[in-house]
Amino acid sequence: MPSFPYCRRFPLLSALFLVSCFSFAQAQEKKKAKPIIDVHVHAMKVNPNFASDMCPWFLSSMPGSIPGADAPSFINTDCAHPLKAAKSDEEFQQKLMETAERLNITFVASGDAEILHRWKKAAPDRVIPSIGVASGMSVQAFEDSLSNGFYQVMGEIAPQYQGMSPADMSLDEYFGVAEKLGIPVGIHMGTGGNGMANLTSPKYRASMGNPFLLEDVLARHPKLKIWVMHAGYPMIDEMIALMGANAYVYVDLAGFIWSYPLEEIHMYLRRLVQAGFGKRILYGTDLMMWPELLETSIGVIENANYLSEDQKRDIFFNNAIRFFNWDAKNFE
Ligand SMILES: [Zn+2]
């Protein structure tokens, strides 16, 4: 039946206009957005003191600094429409869920367990919880968490921020659990460290984002499904070589599609597709505190005029269905 609220609220009056109500509802149903899977969302508590607005593509200028001067923060608000940061957990959740519903987005989210449970309760069909390896977490505890049914994905694994390779043996048993359970793993590689070594993450090493570091992990765990978060940016040649050699490796576009200069983003994405990997690119945002970032990031792919509509649908949806081994019907 029609879902137009006017028709529900005034049933008698509406009876006179049944046809128009019905066709309005039909039109609304037809307009339901095609499903999108965002494989990279962060569930974190909003800290109002650090929740600052942000201009997308802010890394268009990286002037650096000199020792002794203030380390530069690259995030800025010097643009026509800075994205507003949510100021509370409630505001973030409400706007995130409203946008996800409107744009038909389902998202893989990792981070704060309390927030994740709240989100899952609020929108069970929109949220797919993912678990990282918390420091001090035993392999058994990790396996138990993955076996109890709440978590379906492993990530974000980000040893790069500790200056550590993903092939470090301290992570190996956790990858072994994911391989055994058939759980896909998202590993941070590449971008995310601009100026960070000078700001908040002195152990961060750019070299630990080299996609080739995954070769030993893949050799030790031949059935492990890995997706390289941030597509190993900017190491496109290594990324392509790794995907060429390993059929189960996918990439996501998170983070760099809204932070680096647009031409740079499109050069990178275009090269991945041109090299033949259009079926292995997953859509993702790296959303942290700016709800409008969902629209911003979708727009980048929609406006990529070198991609066909089919290629865009692959990136937004089909590739994730295949990689995670989900049923597309559950997302329509
Ligand atoms: Zn990351």
Image (tube, helix red, strand yellow):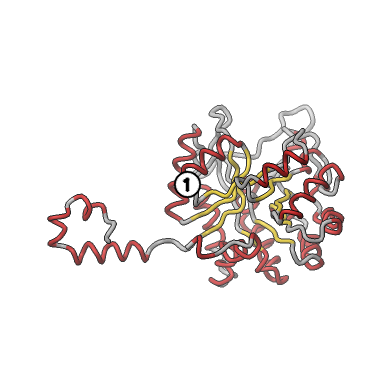
Q: Position of residue 277 (x, y in %)?
A: 70, 68
Residue labelled with disc 1: 123
Q: Quadrant of the N terminus?
A: bottom left
Q: Nearer the viewer, residue 214 or 190?
A: 214
Q: Position of residue 202 (x, y in %)?
A: 79, 34
Q: Is residue 145 left or right of residue 128?
A: right
Mark 1 is surrounded, within 10 Å at the Cα level, by few (under 14), some (14 to 19) or many (20 or more) other residues, namely some
Q: Nearer the viewer, residue 72 or 84?
A: 84
Which residue appears at 65% of the width and 57% of the height?
265
| Residue 324, image quadrant | bottom right
Mark 1 element type:
loop
Q: Nearer the viewer, residue 86 or 69?
A: 86
Q: Nearer the viewer, residue 180 or 253?
A: 180
Q: How many marks?
A: 1
Which residue appears at 76% of the width and 67% of the height?
247
**Is residue 195 visible in the rendered structure shown here?**
no
Q: Is residue 149 left or right of residue 30?
A: right
Confirm or reject: label 1 Cβ below 8 Å from ligand 1. no
Q: Which three-letter amino acid code belongs to the residue tagged 1?
A: Ala
- The vertical placement of 53 against 10, above or below, is above
Q: Position of residue 148 (x, y in %)?
A: 64, 45
**Is residue 297 visible in the rendered structure shown here?**
yes
| Residue 300, image quadrant | bottom right
